[in-house]
Image (spheres, coloured by chain):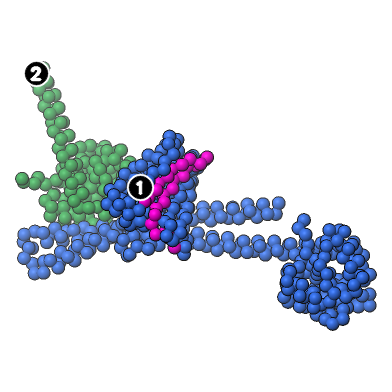
Chain colours: A blue, B green
Amino acid sequence: MKTIRLLLVDDEDDFRQTLSKRLAKRGLAPDQAANGNECLSILNKKAMDVVVLDVKMPGMSGIEVLQNITDNYPKTEVILLTGKATASDGVEGIKSGAFDYLTKPIELEHLFNKILQAYEKIQRLDAEQKEAQYRKQMEQQMIVTERLASLGTLAAGVAHEINNPLAIIRESAGWMRQLFEKDELKDVPRHEDFVKALDKVEKSVERASRITHQLLGFVGKSESAVAEVNLTEVAEEAIQLITHEAQNRDIKIIRQMEPSLNSIWSDAYQIRQVLLNLLTNAIHAVNFDGTITIAVEDVGDSQVITVSDSGQGIPRENLDKIFEPFFSTKPPGQGTGLGLFVSRGIIEKLGGTVEISSKIGQGARFCIRLPKHQKKTDEFDESRGESWVEKIKSRFTEEKGEKSS
Amino acid sequence: MIKIPIRVLLVDDEKDFVEMLGLRLEEAGENVTSAYSGQECLKVLKKKEIDVVILDILMPGMDGIATLKEIKNRFPLVEVIMLTGHGTTESAVKGMKLGAFDYLLKPAHFGELTAKLESARKRKDEQAERIRKAEVKLLLRKSGDI
């Protein structure tokens, strides 16, 4: 049991000392105050759980002190001590917020139990408050998760619908380009302007279709091809794909692969896609002259791939947002803001996690943890939102269970 | 070199898309027929000599995969290029296992498409050529028997 912080307030020195000694023998050594002012100044310096307060005191009366305590220290419980003739003061006290009152002469046993009861009440209130806070936090988290999930589904639906008109725009523009390339249209006035405009149309279609494809890459993959995957090999393949770009920018790639790593069960294609995304981000972060480190290691029931760079790092306010869809720090048209969103989606679908740590000026570090054996996860993304919510809900009930046990 | 037109059958439920892509392919010198559903595609194949079918995977009614199976079953020499719109790459792989020549992501690059058309037609011609030779051999052997 945690020690109860107890304050004994009574103007009769003898009574107070004796009571204090006897309580101390029971393991409840109280602080002492001889009057109301002293009581309040102690409370001001040191939080108390229970105050045992004599009502009839010279100067500030017990009731006044009580009111002050309930106003300023709502977490502190007060037990009043009244004389036989002034029992009505006790009733008044309870109305003003005292836990209970005892009539003098008091029995120690009685007082002791009351103090324990008061303390239990404090603990109960405390627990309730914590739980309410926890619940509120969970609810907020759930709202965010649901919003993100439905946003993802919505975005993918939109992408799906936009792809068809995009194809039509592309073919129409392409056809016009073909026409303008023909001899018969060579001498059309302002020929160049038309071609220039067509250029813009085609480039924009390109840009829009990059976005839709990335979104659909996230949601469209309903079935993943799970097979034996050697993460070192996958990492090596991903590195191969960006080596050229890295060389052009004087970026050194450092490998820290644990040798002879066993294969895991996962989806090589998707992991490579994620790694490629992380490596490309790293290259953009470093920009010119620096290092990118890619490490693969075995940690018990999972394997971990870490991609770190020597770039400028990610500001703290962006760390929370970095996995959100359409969050990008690149200029418009250059980043879709979907890379990390999609990457995280993929890794989570494979039963793994992605974590990020970064400090301004010290680069960023992405850590992908993949289980060695894949648990069967949700096949379709429509159910994704629900499953997240379910997960959180079950976690909530679990923790609640632990608390009450 | 004179371009020999490829006889293309374009199958997609999105009419505007079929129209525009058709115009482009015509412009590039191909011979284009259009169909807006799987059933229509099969009907055309029955009536008309086609080299390559460009086939959308996601169509209402009879989808691309079902159409592909039917094409390969009834017109095994016709080559098929699958068009996949919506991250349906898995269906494209499935399509290729079922005998499709190749696939393209929609919206596709026109250059890529024409290149694939060309190689699909080439494969069809080679296959037709092999069959013709085999038939000639067979014929010769038969006539030799007489």
**Label 1 lies in what chain?**
A
Query: Regarding mark 1 in the picture, which secondary structure is present there?
Result: strand
Q: What residue sits 38% from the left and 62% below the top?
A: A328
Q: What residue sits 14% from the left and 46% below the top?
A: B6
Is any part of residue A263 visible from this angle?
no
Residue A307 circle label: none
Q: What residue sits 94% from the left and 77% below the top?
A: A85
Residue nearest the observer in this picture, A83 or B83: A83
Q: Main secondary structure of the magenta part?
A: strand
The verdict on residue A303 being magenta is: yes
Q: Residue furthest bottom?
A: A59
State whether residue B27 is above or below residue A299: below
Q: Residue A224 in the image: x percent, y percent?
A: 41, 44
| Residues rendered magenta in the picture | A291-315
Is B37 on the left or on the right of A320, as rendered? left
Characterize the local packing of mark 2: few (<14), some (14-19) or many (20 or more) Cα atoms within 10 angstroms: few
Amino acid residing under circle 2: Gly
Q: Quadrant of the N terminus of chain A?
A: bottom right
Residue at which label 1 appears = A253
Closest to the camera, between mark 2 and mark 1, is 1
Residue at which label 2 appears = B144
Q: What residue sits 22% from the left and 64% below the top?
A: A200
**Label 2 lies in what chain?**
B
Amino acid residing under circle 1: Ile
Residue nearest the observer in this picture, B122 or B60: B122
Q: Quadrant of residue A194?
A: bottom left
Query: Regarding mark 2 in the picture, which secondary structure is present there?
Result: helix
